[in-house]
Amino acid sequence: MAKNDSEMGINTLLAHSGNNPHDYFGFVNPPVVHASTVLYPNAATMAARSQKYTYGTRGTPTTDALAHAIDALEGSAGTIVVPSGLAAVTVPLLAFLSAGDHVLIVDSVYHPTRNFADTMLKRLGVEVEYYDPHAGAGIAALIKSSTRVVFTESPASNTFEVQDIPAIAKAAHAAGAIIMMDNTWATPLYFRPLDHGVDISIHAATKYPAGHSDVLLGTVSANKACWKQLCETFYTMGCCAGPDDVYQVLRGLRTMGVRLDHHQRSALAIAGWLEGQPGVARVLHPALPSHPDHALWKRDFCGSSGIFSIVLKGGGQKQQHAFLDALRIFGLGYSWGGYESLAVPVFLGDRVVAKGPYDGPLIRLQIGLEDVEDLKADLARGLAAADGS
């Protein structure tokens, strides 16, 4: 497990971080506080805002419990909780970019991040440039005097390239830029971005922290240097998350360690099996020794999650759709990190440099908590259907 500041094991930390039951009459879980107005005892306190809670958008005991738990995992100075994983991407970008600035974004980024950059950021006067996920220290050649942010995601969405985050962070900091990382794949259990030079760590808590495909939430954690600016932007934008969703994610967080371990073991078993199946050209899973970035993954990460992609051996969309339509256990749906297995077609047509080549169509698999042998049988059905299409 990734290093943390506590001497406790990670599952102990997950079980007990975020709140003290004795602050709430001994109840194990924190209260779910539904709040907009917060009353002040007198006018002087109101004028000075000299009490812990001032208004619902600025935090409650519920949001604080989750934020403090995430800080304990991330080693961060502070965490904001926002309504979705996409909001966890957009808020820090808006916090640190202005008209005339230049941002470098990894070309293999989560598509909604790209869409936000290509629409909102460009409309606001930010110059957007995409870079190869294998740039590493070479990213220094792309950094301009106006570069304010380098946005990373490792492993990459859909194609799972591993970035050399410490080298990129070193180059970014040398030029006065900050580095952000979408770390949803690994969670802070298997990679702690701030320990590797990242300034802002982003998570779609919709995924593994929530774990049950029924909640949308995002978290953004910052180091001490970036926390104030991130927090002030969050307050200014007013995009706070609802207390019931926050509570559900905190509840899911308690079991994330054991769930993630199961996802990891099942995904590795299935990924290794798929490498030997006819009809599969490649398995894109960085924890496999066959992956070209395996050594880099092994250097920086201490675990892997349940999502990876496969490349079919030849064919096109017809074979891709035949594979997907033959599945009975794997659902066809977006997101991941829940208890159920999912499969989606991968589209790379929007990329600039990280396009492949690949031998055939790509399919992304989320390995859930089902029995491995049942999932293998389902995937075998898909492969047979693709072969016969």
Image (cartoon, rainbow, N blue to C red):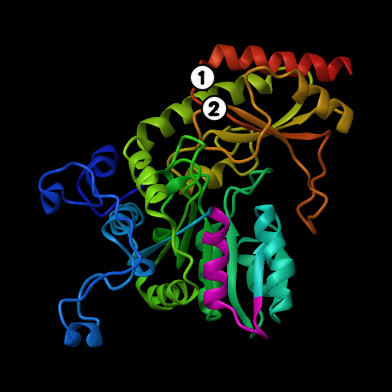
Horizontal arrangement in the rendering, residue 222 relative to residue 116 (left or right): left
Q: Nearer the viewer, residue 4 or 363?
A: 363
Q: Is residue 129 visible?
A: no
Q: Where residue 370 is drawn, which disc sits there?
A: 1
x%, y% of residue 292?
65, 41
- Quickly name the residue at label 2: 340
Quadrant of res 307:
top right
The crowd level at tag 2 (other Cα within 10 Å; few <14, some 14-19, many 20+) is some
Q: Are marks 2 and 1 in contact (CB under 8 Å)?
A: yes
Q: Is residue 270 left or right of residue 265?
A: right
Image quadrant in which the N terminus is located: top left
User: Which amino acid type is shown beneath numbered disc 2?
Assistant: Glu
Label 1 SS? loop
In the drawing, does residue 33 fall left or right of residue 177?
Answer: left
Image quadrant where residue 210 sits: top left
Q: Residues within 10 Å of mark 1 (few under 14, many from 20)?
A: some
Q: What segment is highlighted magenta in the picture?
A: 85-102
Say if the magenta span includes residue 326.
no
At which x and y percent is residue 15? Answer: 25, 40
Q: How many marks?
A: 2
> Magenta span: helix, strand or loop, mainly?
helix
Sequence-wise first label, 2 or 1: 2
Residue in the image at 41% along x and 31% along y: 259
- Tell me, yes or no, whether the highlighted magenta stretch contains residue 86: yes
Residue found at x 62% / y 19%: 329
Q: Position of residue 277 (x, y in %)?
A: 71, 17
